[in-house]
């Protein structure tokens, strides 16, 4: 019949306030997907039923409509209206069976959305948020839930045919073809539909739920990778158990399948019972995978599994509510990882990500509320704010409620809303009802943008023996949100005796007696004060313990007080927080570095043998990108790099023999568990880079030996970095060796690209060499990100000609080929307006030039917002 050519009928900008419920419910959908080499035929049969007044609108994009029948009658072209975004059935009856046949082209789909060819022998789907409309015409919105029956048919060269739910039937389809018929008994929105057609191996296991359900667990990957799925399988079983124990949520189907592909725009996707994963988030083997990547595999496996309840069983009413499922699920996966390894180090790593990604986003032109109220392209809102700030909002409510009440609240949420598509308001209301604590003030956190600033002043009254805190909160004015309100800020705090280092019991003035519970003060107004009594000498105050709220804190600590907290705070996260505050002063406010050096030496030397993982994190120096996010005008990347390098050199020098001693005595193989061993590997790699800084004459020999004598990827890469970034004589030779060893391991080769792109002096020739390498591939987002990730880890290079050229050129290419990735890429330059002149004007000119050339909704919206400052 026809491919739509008319202008789209959907509005440019979608607003939350315009939400209307769907006119029709879809009781069931039967899909038949027949894959051929050069096209795919999709037939669908929908049983629809009117719920509200309005037209029957079936969304569809890039579909070739072959036929449409309503209640058995073919429709003539006058009976429907078709444009490039939707098919409107005129005068649809209240009950109808709609049968549609379309042709699609997954074999040439480069956007990696909808159904697409993900390598020679694999077709997969990615339907969140709006990919299903590229498979067939459907009310592709999250509040339309239906029972899906799926028949998948393909040539037998693809032995694996998967879809959601239970396998009902398999059989011959003639001409060397076969089929499989699946049915998912749970009603779900179309974004959770998935199917997979391919030639894959499978790793099988089982899990018995707390209810006694036997669940078949299957991880599908290329045959050569199948053994690398063991860690993911264990993480899956651990997650299933963890959700039963911590949230009372057992799994609900008889099978749980995970499929790995390297052609994937993001980390993974929680399709009901059939997750599809980027290989980078499922394959794990210490010989080819770093410790950090192994931790990521475990957390993403958990994240997608936890979505089964927070996202799938209870889904979002509309895409503005995205943080309802993502924020809560990130909070859940963070909590799982805290239980898996050191809770303090997990919190350190999560807060580091929040501060280096979400805080800058919220401070610039891409700032938006955790629940946005308008968008042009929803794919642009899978952001650090929705995910990470969303997680912090759930965490704040959990902190305030405590374990038991939080569990009562989540129990009520699952009880009320299982099987529904709901809103952030529904979540907060259920949590409040279940816990008996009114949390409605937290809605403000979801609804307004910006990182609040918490100003605290302290006053010690020696005569009265009181210690008084004055608190104020504010947030930077925002042109689009003139009515910014105070938010509830849980302030976790402690007082320490400055002489003994002991933590004091908090006693408040009568008036405030009930306000500090378990060391958490809920600060809800624009300003407030709180007085502690019986404080016999001026104490040291520790604020925002465990980072109890995502705010920027201003408190006039002395450097000595921060050094004190570094040594005496009772948990590792709070110690780390003290190091970061102290270093920020050194780096951005020219405080002397000596106090830090003295304190870090004392602390780390003691910790090295007892908690090497924490010791490795306490040596963190804030990243250049984080430091950049703290500078709003006149940002000079070279100056920041120089300062940071100077601090690192000072640390290298000050700790002297510590580095070589630790390097020689710490033994990863002698550790009792993975966390300790990971800590030891991390410390030895830090030691190696510190030895390079002080010009140790043996460092290249040590690195060379470490590179060659290990079977562990964290160690091999740690050594490779030192050799390559310091231009060691053998750098090219080991790079070649690495390539030869790992040329069939795509994820290791990503690291090979990344290390080179992150060279301190990466120039145009180097980057062009990488992007013209035969293994560089614009169809594999992991490979693209390896180069962009390396480049942007060095802001001097990112903002130099080489970086700006690369990002602008890449965005132009991806605008046509894969706009989701294109839009992501250009965001690396979103803080252009903070640069000092002439760089600011130069980069702006490049962005304006790019703005004139791009056409995809994704990139256009992002670049328009970036230039709106
Ligand atoms: N829900 C998916 C993200 C889909 C992104 C679409 N652009 C993965 C996750 O957050 O679990
Ligand atoms: Zn998620």
Image (cartoon, rainbow, N blue to C red):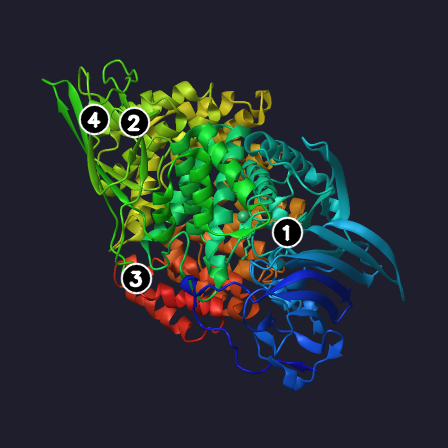
Which residue position holds label 2? 516
Q: Tell me if residue 693 comes above or below residue 504 in the rendering.
A: below
Label 2 – label 1 distance at C-alpha: 43 Å
- The foreground one among 264 and 788 is 264
Label 4 – label 1 distance at C-alpha: 52 Å
Residue 828 placement, left or right of 272: left
> For the residues carrying marks 2 and 4, which lies nearer the camera in this image?
4
Which residue position holds label 1? 271
Near mark 4 (Cα within 10 A), the count class, few <14, some 14-19 or many ≥20, is: few
Dot 3 or dot 4, earlier in sequence = 3
Which quarter of the image is occupied by the N terminus?
bottom right
Label 2 – label 4 distance at C-alpha: 11 Å
- The foreground one among 31 and 675 is 31
Q: Tell me if residue 807 comes above or below residue 76 in the rendering.
A: above
Q: Which quadrant holds residue 122? A: bottom right
Q: Picture coordinates of residue 341 (x, y %)? A: 53, 29
Residue 824 placement, left or right of 150: left
Say whether mark 4 is within 8 Å of ligand 2: no
Q: Tell me if residue 653 comes above or below residue 272 in the rendering.
A: above
Which secondary structure, mark 4?
Answer: helix
Near mark 2 (Cα within 10 A), the count class, few <14, some 14-19 or many ≥20, is: some
Which residue position holds label 3? 480
> For the residues carrying marks 2 and 1, which lies nearer the camera in this image?
2
Which quarter of the image is occupied by the C terminus?
bottom left
Instruction: Please give the label number shown on residue 511.
Output: 4
Q: Are marks 2 and 4 in contact (CB under 8 Å)?
A: no
Instruction: Please give the label number shown on residue 850.
Output: none
> For the residues carrying marks 3 and 2, which lies nearer the camera in this image?
2
> For the residues carrying marks 3 and 4, which lies nearer the camera in this image?
4
Dot 2 or dot 1, earlier in sequence = 1
Label 3 – label 2 distance at C-alpha: 35 Å
Label 3 – label 1 distance at C-alpha: 35 Å
């Amino acid at each position: 019949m026809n491919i739509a050519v008319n202008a789209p009928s959907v509005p440019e900008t979608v607003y939350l306030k315009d939400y209307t419920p769907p006119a029709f419910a879809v009781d069931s959908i039967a899909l038949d997907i027949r894959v051929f080499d050069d096209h795919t035929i999709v037939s669908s049969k929908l049983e629809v039923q009117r719920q509200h007044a309005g037209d029957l609108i079936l969304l569809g994009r890039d579909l070739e409509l072959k036929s449409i029948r309503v209640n058995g009658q073919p429709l003539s072209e006058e009976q429907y209206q078709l444009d490039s975004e939707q098919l409107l059935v005129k005068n649809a009856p209240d009950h109808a069976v709609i049968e549609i046949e379309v042709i699609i082209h997954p074999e040439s789909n480069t956007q990696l959305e909808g159904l697409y060819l993900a390598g020679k022998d694999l077709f997969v789907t990615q339907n969140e948020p709006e990919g299903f409309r590229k498979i067939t015409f459907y009310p592709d919105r999250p509040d339309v839930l239906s029972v899906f029956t799926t028949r998948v048919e393909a040539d037998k060269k693809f032995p694996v045919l998967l879809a959601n739910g239970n396998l009902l039937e398999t059989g011959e389809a003639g001409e060397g073809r076969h089929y499989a018929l699946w049915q998912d008994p749970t009603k779900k929105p179309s974004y959770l539909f998935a199917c997979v057609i391919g030639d894959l191996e499978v790793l099988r296991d089982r899990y018995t739920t707390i209810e006694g359900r036997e669940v078949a667990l299957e991880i599908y990957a290329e045959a050569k990778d199948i053994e690398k799925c063991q860690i993911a399988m264990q993480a899956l079983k651990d997650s299933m158990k963890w959700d039963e124990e911590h949230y009372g949520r057992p799994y609900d189907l008889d099978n749980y399948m995970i499929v790995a592909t390297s052609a994937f725009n993001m980390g993974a996707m929680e399709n009901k019972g059939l997750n599809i994963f980027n290989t980078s988030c499922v394959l794990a083997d210490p010989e080819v995978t770093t410790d950090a990547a192994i931790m990521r595999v475990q957390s993403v496996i958990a994240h997608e599994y936890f979505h089964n309840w927070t996202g799938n069983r209870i889904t979002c009413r509309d895409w503005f509510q995205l943080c309802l499922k993502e924020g809560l699920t990130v909070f859940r996966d963070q909590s799982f990882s805290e239980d898996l390894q050191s809770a303090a180090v997990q919190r350190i790593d999560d807060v580091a990500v929040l501060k280096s990604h979400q805080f800058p986003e919220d401070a610039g032109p891409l700032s938006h509320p955790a629940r946005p109220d308008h968008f042009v392209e929803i794919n642009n809102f899978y952001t650090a704010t929705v995910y990470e700030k969303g997680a912090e909002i759930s965490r704040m409510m959990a902190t305030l409620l405590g374990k038991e009440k939080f569990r009562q609240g989540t129990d009520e949420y699952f009880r009320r809303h299982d099987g529904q598509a709901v809103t952030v308001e529904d979540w907060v209301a259920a949590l409040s009802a279940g816990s008996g604590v009114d949390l409605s003030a937290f809605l403000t956190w979801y609804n307004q943008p910006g990182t609040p600033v918490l100003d605290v002043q302290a006053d010690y009254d020696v005569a009265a023996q009181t210690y008084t805190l004055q608190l104020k909160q504010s947030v930077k004015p925002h042109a689009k949100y003139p009515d910014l309100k105070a938010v509830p800020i849980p302030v976790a705090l402690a007082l320490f005796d400055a002489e003994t280092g002991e933590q004091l019991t908090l006693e408040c003035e009568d008036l405030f007696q009930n306000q500090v519970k378990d060391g958490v003060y809920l600060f809800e107004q624009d300003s407030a004060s709180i007085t502690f009594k019986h404080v016999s000498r001026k104490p040291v105050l520790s604020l925002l313990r465990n980072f109890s709220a995502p705010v920027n804190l201003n408190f006039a600590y002395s450097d000595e007080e921060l050094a004190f907290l570094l040594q005496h705070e009772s948990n590792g996260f709070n110690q780390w927080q003290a190091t970061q505050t102290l270093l920020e002063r050194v780096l951005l406010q020219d405080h002397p570095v000596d106090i830090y050096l003295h304190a870090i030496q004392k602390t780390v030397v003691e910790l090295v043998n007892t908690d090497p993982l924490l010791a490795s994190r306490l040596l963190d120096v804030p990243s250049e990108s984080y430091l950049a996010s703290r500078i709003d005008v006149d940002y000079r990347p070279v100056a920041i790099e120089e300062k940071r390098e100077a601090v690192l050199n000072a640390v290298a020098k000050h700790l002297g023999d510590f580095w070589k001693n630790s390097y020689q005595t710490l033994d990863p193989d002698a550790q009792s568990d993975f966390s300790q061993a990971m800590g030891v590997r991390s410390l030895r790699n830090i030691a190696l880079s510190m030895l390079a800084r002080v010009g140790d004459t043996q460092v290249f020999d040590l690195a060379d030996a470490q590179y060659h004598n290990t079977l562990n990827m964290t160690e091999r890469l740690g050594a490779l970095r030192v050799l390559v970034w310091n231009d060691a004589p053998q750098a090219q030779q080991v790079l070649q060796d690495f390539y030869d060893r790992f040329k069939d391991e795509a994820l290791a080769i990503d690291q090979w690209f990344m290390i080179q792109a992150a060279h301190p002096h990466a120039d145009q020739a180097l980057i062009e060499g990488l992007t013209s390498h035969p293994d560089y591939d614009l169809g594999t987002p992991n490979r693209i990100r390896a180069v962009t990730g390396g480049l942007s880890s060095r802001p001097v290079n990112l903002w130099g000609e080489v970086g700006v050229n690369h990002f602008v050129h890449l965005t132009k290419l991806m605008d046509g080929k894969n706009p989701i990735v294109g839009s992501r890429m250009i965001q690396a330059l979103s803080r252009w307006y903070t640069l000092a002149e002439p760089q600011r004007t130069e980069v702006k000119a490049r962005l304006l030039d790019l703005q004139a050339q791009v056409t995809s909704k994704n990139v256009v919206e992002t670049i328009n917002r970036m230039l709106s400052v």
